[in-house]
Image (cartoon, grey):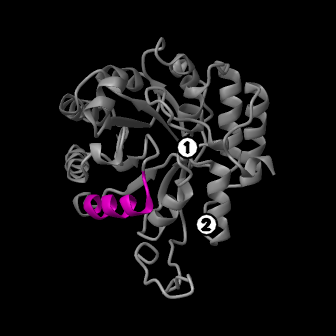
Amino acid sequence: MLFLNPPIHWGGYVPIHPPISVPGKVFIAEVGPRDGLQMEQQVVPTDLKLALIEGLADAGLSSIQVAAFVHPEKMPQMADAEALIARLPVRKNLHYSALTLNLKGVERACRTSIPWIEVSLAANDAQSLRNAGMSMRQALDESAAMTAMALRNDRSVQASIQCAFGCSCPTDTEVGQVRQIAATLVGQGISLLMLADTTGLATPRSVVDLLEQVLPVTDKVPVGLHLHDTRGLGLVNLMTALQMGIVHFDTALGGLGGCPFVSGAAGNIATEDTLHLLHSLHIETGIDAARVAQWSRRLSDFFGHPLPGRMYRL
C-alpha cells in the first residue's frame, strides 16, 4: 500500500508515489435510523423516524437501515420496528434493511415487508455473549439457520462481523478467525459482507491486513466496512480501504451511533464527513450532503446535544 511503509528521507518528507488511485463510485448505506438512534436515551417517535427516513431518501441515499429486531427492553429505540416498517414509503431504487441477532429476530423480520435482513455476529466470544447471549461458535451455527430462513422468505441477506478488528484490544480477535467466519458466511448464501470496527480499534495497517486475508475467501460477494471513529481514524481507515478497491461503507448522519454493549464505542463515521472526503476525490455517490446535514441539525436539536460529526455544523 502506498502510504503505509514508504521510504523515509532526510528532511522529514515522505514522498507518496504513485498518485492515489480510488474507485469512481462508492455505495453508502445510511445506518443512522438504526445504529445511530440506538445509543440515544430519548426515544424517537415513529413519526419522526419516518420523516427522517424520507428526508434521507430525498437526499439521495438508496440504502437505509431502519430498524433492529431485538428485545425491546434491551433496546427501547427499536421497539417500534414492525410498526415503522409497515409505514415505510415505497420508492424505486431504494432498499431498506433491518438488523437481527438471532433466529427469533429473523422470524419477526420475515413477518414484515423488509427486503434486506442483516445477520450480525461477533468475531469475539466476549462480545458475542454480551450482544447475542451465545458463544461465537453458537452464533455462527445460528447464522446458518437465520440466513436459510431469510432466503426461504425471499429476502436478501447481508452479514456483518462485529469486532472484526478487535474487541477490547487489537490482539483479542485473530485475523485468521475473521477470515474463517467470513468464508463460512459466504457459504451460507449471503449477498454482502460487512466487516465492523465495533470498538474503533482499526488502523490503516490492520485494515490492509484484514482485507488481504478476507477478500480471497469471499468469492463474488462484495465486502464493505462499517467503521467507527472512536480513536479518530475512521476516515483514515476508509481512505485505506478505498485504495484497496472497497466501495461499500456504512455511515450515520451526524456521526450518531456506537454499540450499547461496548463501553466507549463512539459513533459511526459521519455521513456528511464521509461525503465531504469522497466528493473531494471526485468519487460519485449520488447523495446531497447538505440535505443530510439538515437532518443532523434537526436531530441535534431534538436530543439537546451536539452530534459527533463535523461537517453538519458548517
Residue 103 image position (x, y, % from top left): 29, 24
The image's mark for residue 284 is 2
Taking the image as shown, residue 155 lies to the left or right of residue 8, namely left
Mark 2: amino acid: Glu
Using the image as rendered, state which of residue 276 and residue 30 is in the foreground.
276
Q: Crowdedness of circle 2 by 10 Å Cα count: few (<14), some, many (20+)?
A: some
Q: Secondary structure at mark 1?
A: loop
What's the residue at 51%, 45% (across, down)? 228
Name the dominant secondary structure of the magenta segment. helix
What's the residue at 62%, 72% (across, down)? 281
Using the image as rendered, state which of residue 167 and residue 221 is in the foreground.
167
Taking the image as shown, residue 236 lies to the left or right of residue 7, namely right
Q: Is residue 208 magenta?
A: yes
Image marks 2 and 1: residues in contact by CB distance under 8 Å: no
Q: CA distance from mark 2 to mark 1?
A: 21 Å
Residue 12, located in which quarter of the rendered image? bottom right
The residue where tag 1 is placed is 268
Q: Which residues are magenta?
A: 202-215
Q: Is residue 29 magenta?
A: no
What's the residue at 57%, 39% (across, down)? 267
Mark 1: amino acid: Asn
